Amino acid sequence: MTYETMYAYIAEKEPLCVAHDTIADDLFTKYGVNRGLRDQNGKGVLTGLTTISDVVSFREENGERIPIDGELWYRGYNIKTLISNLDGEYGFEKTAYLLIFGEMPDKTELENFKRILSACRRLPNSFTRDVIMKAPTQDIMNSMTRSILTLASYDKATNSGVLADSIRQCLFLLSVFPMLAVYGYHAYNHYRNYASMYIHRPNPQLSTAENFLYMLRPDGKYTELEAKVLDVALMLHMEHGGGNNSTFTTRVITSSGSDTYSTMAAAMSSLKGPRHGGANIKVMEMMRNIRDNVSDTSNRAELRDYLSKILDKKAFDRKGLIYGLGHAVYSISDPREGVLKSYVERLAEAKGREKDLELYRNIEQLGPELIAEKRKIFKGVSPNVDFYSGFVYEMLGIPQELFTPLFAIARIAGWSAHRIEEIVGAGKIIRPAYKSIMEKCE
């Protein structure tokens, strides 16, 4: 059967799927079902308990939910405090220890942990050639997922079910994720874009952020500011509560008794979805479109007019969204955006990108005003971390194909913590219920 014949058949049958699988909106209200497990105010349905992190956007006062500036907590520590207390050091490794083991490491524990991660930054012999370079693709998330599942074949304890093995596997994947991402990109760039091929082995003396830039760049060089900004970006993306899509996926797969590699591959498949992990890419595409259609981006009136067209579905992708503004949980502010913004300003000055930064600042102010005018909203609208993260990665010279993989490099720490917590507290397989509304034949 040819592709043409197959798609002709599908074109004929596709309307049947649409007709029989469309469920009217009023039925969700009738049966009290919250789409996306969230009510109209964005509040999620409770599906579990965790000690790993907390995302705060409201305070309760006399039975009423009062919006507040957003807060993000890792194991009892405010993310702003964790970053402000770095004192010149790189914080990703320390924060990973905190999330996975539940307490802040002292100096000796941190050095031992770093040595463990460094020792784990090794792939099996010929793995890069035989797996990563075998079928290069622009979709680096798919490349990484394939590599993760293949790595299970090299682990004699993949299905042991022993907690210690799961912890070891989590630490191993935490260590090699940057290699899987960067090597996957180099393979794609060489075989598909006909660019030069170079593979730098990770330097055991460097942090995760430093090693990423070292392995990515042909000369392996980077500035201290570049590495520090990337380190902070990774810290901000490491964990965000148990309710986000990929972390919930991690807990669901873990609850079934599946292995670490399969669990993390499933989380990767969730994160690669554009509704979850690709928001900063949409921001970058939108910014390019704005620059192409606004003659003077510093002219606030002209910019405001074009943003209005975007919201009215008359410009950009015609979906009526100003990407990077608004969040499913936060209302007044996203604490991650506030932290990242200060580093963005320093990096933009160092890179001579002040004009671009001015554009971001203007949209940050004008966007919420326009959204408030044009939309019936139930909570505040503010910039989220994705509003600036793509700009940061672009200034660092990181190709867009690696934007979502960078998210994964950070979030593997949170996924690992939630997998371990689910194993330790395992009781039942996570099995939600669906209400059947089908018409039954006689």
Image (spheres, rainbow, N blue to C red):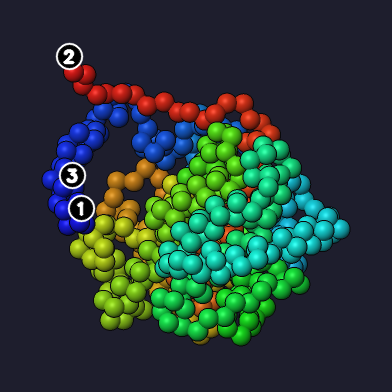
Which mark, residue 14? Answer: 3
Mark 3 and mark 2 lie on one chain; the one further toward the N terminus is: 3
Marks 3 and 1 sit apart, C-alpha to C-alpha, by 19 Å
Q: Amino acid at mark 2?
A: Glu
Q: Residue 89's quadrant in the figure?
A: bottom right
Left-right relation of 398 to 302: right
Residue 434's spot in the image, x, y percent? Answer: 37, 27
First along the sequence among labels 3 and 1: 1
Calculate the distance from the C-alpha at mark 3 to the C-alpha at mark 2: 26 Å
Check disc 2 and report the residue beneath it.
Answer: 442
| Badge 3 vs badge 1, beta-carbon distance below 8 Å | no
Residue 56 is situated, as x and y percent measured from the top left of the image, at 56, 44
Q: Which mark is residue 1?
A: 1
Looking at numbered disc 1 in the image, what kind of residue is underneath it? Met
With respect to residue 353, does 373 lie above or below?
Answer: above
Q: Quadrant of the C terminus?
A: top left
User: What crowding class fits label 1: few (fewer than 14 Cα within 10 Å), some (14-19), or many (20 or more)?
Assistant: few
The local secondary structure at tag 2 comes to loop
Q: Is residue 326 above or below residue 405?
A: above
- Tag 3: Cα neighbours inside 10 Å, few (<14), some, or many (≥20)? few
- x then y, percent, for residue 110: 80, 58
Q: Secondary structure at mark 3?
A: helix
CA–CA distance between discs 2 and 1? 37 Å
Q: Secondary structure at mark 1?
A: loop
Residue furthest to the front in view is 1
The image shows a total of numbered marks equal to: 3
Residue 334: in sight, yes or no?
no
Identity of the residue drawn at 57% across and 64% down: 180
- Foreground: 183 or 36? 183
Mark 2 neighbour class, 10 Å CA radius: few under 14, some 14 to 19, many 20 or more: few
Which residue is rendered at x = 54% and y = 29% of the image? 429
